[in-house]
């Protein structure tokens, strides 16, 4: 058996919008067409069905009794189609995840690895958030974080990525070969670091290296590594 032919879907869509918004102009704006196009589609629908579905006056658009029955059906039909399409798109769209980490970690470690990361997890749309302060994690906002610290952390699922080894470094051209050579070079300082604790500064390193006569107050200071 052949199913009865439906009116043109474009005409039904124009009718549903005009009836719901009670305005040809508003329907035209929603469907990105002209009010004249909406009027033409309604006339086409009424000609196809051989009945009047809308009463038009200069001030308003109202449904006829038969138009009301058609509107209830088209509104339900288009609404169900929209719900299914939204669900299907959500199932196939990449999952958006916002990750926050320190400016230094993102710029020097994660960003150079982004291409490999996308190939490994192509179904994840990763958004990066650079911040040196602790951020609140919540669904729909910042959801994941990479930070220094010892877990576990309350209210989160966490795992250790790696352990840091803090050590002084220098250019080979300086020719440093023993601890005493540090007295003739410029020390560079990173201020504001609170992780790991105690913070890895020159004072802490000198204590562990057994150096007592090195001036650790001199040298340029930077807010971030």
Image: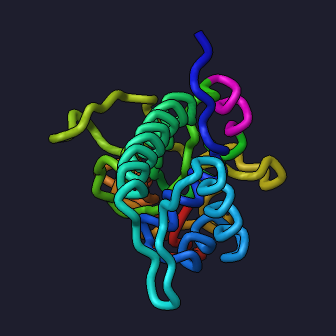
* Residue drawn where x is 70% and y is 26% of the image: 119
User: Does 63 lie within the magenta span?
Assistant: no
Residue for point 45% across, 29% down: 162
- Residue at the left extreme? 154
Q: Is residue 118 magenta?
A: yes
Measured along the vertical axis of the image, is residue 192 above or below residue 97?
below
Q: Which residues are magenta?
A: 113-120
Residue 3 spot, x, y in % from top left:
58, 20
Left or right: residue 154 compared with residue 147: left
Quadrant assignment, res 188:
bottom right
Residue 31 at x, y percent in the picture: 63, 64
> Who is closer to the viewer here, 30 or 8?
8
Q: Is the stretch drawn in magenta largely helix, strand or loop?
A: helix
Is 116 situated above or below 186? above
- Front one among 106 and 168: 106
Vertical relation: 61 (above or below) 93? below
Q: State the residue lying farthest toward the bottom.
A: 58
List x then y, in percent, for residue 186: 65, 68
Which residue is depicted at the point 65% across and 68% down?
Answer: 38
List the single residue furthest toward the front.
50
Quadrant including the C terminus:
bottom right
């Amino acid at each position: 058996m052949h199913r009865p032919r439906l009116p043109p879907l474009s005409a039904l869509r124009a009718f549903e919008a005009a009836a719901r918004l009670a305005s040809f102009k508003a329907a035209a704006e929603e469907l990105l067409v002209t009010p004249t196009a909406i009027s033409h589609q309604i006339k086409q629908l009424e000609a196809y069905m051989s009945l009047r579905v809308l009463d038009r006056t200069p001030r308003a658009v109202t449904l006829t009794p038969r138009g009301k029955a058609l509107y209830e059906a088209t509104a339900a039909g288009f609404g169900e189609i929209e719900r299914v399409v939204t669900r299907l798109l959500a199932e196939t769209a990449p999952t958006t995840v916002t990750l926050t980490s320190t400016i230094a970690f993102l710029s020097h470690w994660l960003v150079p690895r982004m291409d490999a990361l996308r190939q490994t997890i192509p179904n994840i749309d990763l958004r990066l958030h650079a911040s040196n302060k602790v951020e609140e994690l919540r669904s729909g906002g910042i959801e994941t974080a990479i930070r220094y610290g010892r877990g576990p952390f309350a209210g989160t699922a966490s795992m250790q990525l790696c352990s840091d080894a803090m050590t002084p470094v220098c250019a080979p051209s300086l020719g440093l070969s023993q601890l005493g050579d540090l007295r003739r070079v410029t020390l560079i300082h990173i201020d504001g670091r609170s992780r790991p604790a105690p913070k890895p500064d020159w004072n802490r390193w000198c204590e562990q290296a057994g150096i007592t006569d090195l001036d650790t107050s001199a040298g340029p200071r930077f807010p971030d590594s």
